[in-house]
Each structure stands twice: as C-alpha cells, then as structure tokens.
C-alpha cells in the first residue's frame, strides 16, 4: 500500500500538467480504493495494523522481503498519519483523506520549488 502511495503516486505527478493532475488524483483514488479493499482481508470495511503490516511484508523486490520489525514500523508510521480518530482502525475515508493530503503536500512543495527558481534564463557575459 505505501509502495504506490509514496513512490508510484508521487512519481506519477512529477511531470504532469495541473489539469492532468486532477485525472491522476482521480485514478490514484480509484486504484487506492481497490488496494484498500484487497488489503481488508476480513472484509469488515476497515484496515487494522495487522492487515497493513501483512500487506507491507508481502512487498519487496525479488528475493529481498521486508522483515517483521521493519514492516511493523512502517505500519505504525502509516497508521499514525491515516487513523485520524485514533480508534485503532483505518476506514477507507481516512485512507483516502491521507492520499489527498499527500497530493496536496506534494503539489505545495512543487509550487514552492517553482517559485524559488529564476523566472527565465540567466543571461551570460556578453561576447560568449
């Protein structure tokens, strides 16, 4: 879950124009909804830390898997941000709100980065 949230979604918006970002946001929300339902293994409509940890442990590339301790830490970090009412479970609405905040933070950081760049090309010395 965090794999596409952190890497895929943010990387997908690196070069996307503002109008297309809305489409990216909508498609990310739809994909996230499917991922949420797939991770909700007991189909009770919420994610527990155990379900998130199990999903994280299935991540990894090739033979390198995420170990139990690190998966637990990642699940704790995700829960700290996603579980808005701190009831020990994350609803899809809470997870979607975190996804939306992630997009907002990324877009704000990109806007700040653009505002710090020079407006146009910097003129070099004459005659060169």
Image (cartoon, helix red, strand yellow):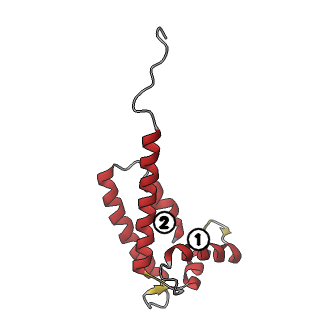
Other-residue count near label 2 (Cα within 10 Å), few / some / many at <14 / 14–19 / ≥20 = some
**Which residue position is annotated with label 2?**
5
Residue 88 coordinates in the image, percent (x, y): 54, 86
Q: Residues within 10 Å of mark 1 (few under 14, many from 20)?
A: some
Question: Is residue 117 depicted above or below 31 in this figure?
Answer: above
Disc marking residue 59: 1
Q: What residue do we see at 46% from left, 63% from top?
A: 102
**What is the CA distance from the residue labelled 1 to the residue labelled 2?**
13 Å
Q: Element type at marker 1?
A: loop
Of the numbered discs 1 and 2, the one sitting upstream in the chain is: 2
Figure quadrant of residue 60? bottom right
Disc number lying in front (1 or 2): 2
Disc number placed over residue 119 in the picture, else none: none
Q: Determine the residue positioned at 51% across, 62% down.
A: 6
Question: Is 59 displayed left or right of 101 in the figure?
Answer: right
Foreground residue, 98 or 68?
98
User: Does residue 58 appear in the picture of this structure?
Assistant: no
The answer to which quarter of the image holds residue 35 is bottom left
Residue occupying image coordinates x 43% and y 68%: 99
Give the residue displayed 59% in from the left and 80% down from the top: 54
């Amino acid at each position: 879950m965090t794999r596409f949230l952190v890497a895929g979604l943010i990387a997908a918006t690196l070069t996307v124009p503002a109008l297309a970002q809305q489409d990216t946001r909508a498609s990310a929300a739809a994909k996230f909804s499917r991922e949420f339902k797939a991770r909700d293994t007991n189909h009770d409509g919420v994610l527990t830390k155990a379900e998130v940890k199990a999903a994280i442990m299935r991540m990894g590339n090739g033979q390198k898997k995420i170990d139990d301790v690190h998966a637990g830490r990642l699940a704790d970090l995700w829960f700290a941000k996603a579980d808005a009412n701190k009831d020990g479970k994350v609803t899809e609405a809470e997870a979607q709100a975190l996804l939306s905040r992630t997009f907002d933070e990324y877009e704000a950081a990109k806007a700040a980065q653009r505002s710090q760049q020079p407006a146009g090309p910097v003129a070099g010395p004459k005659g060169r």
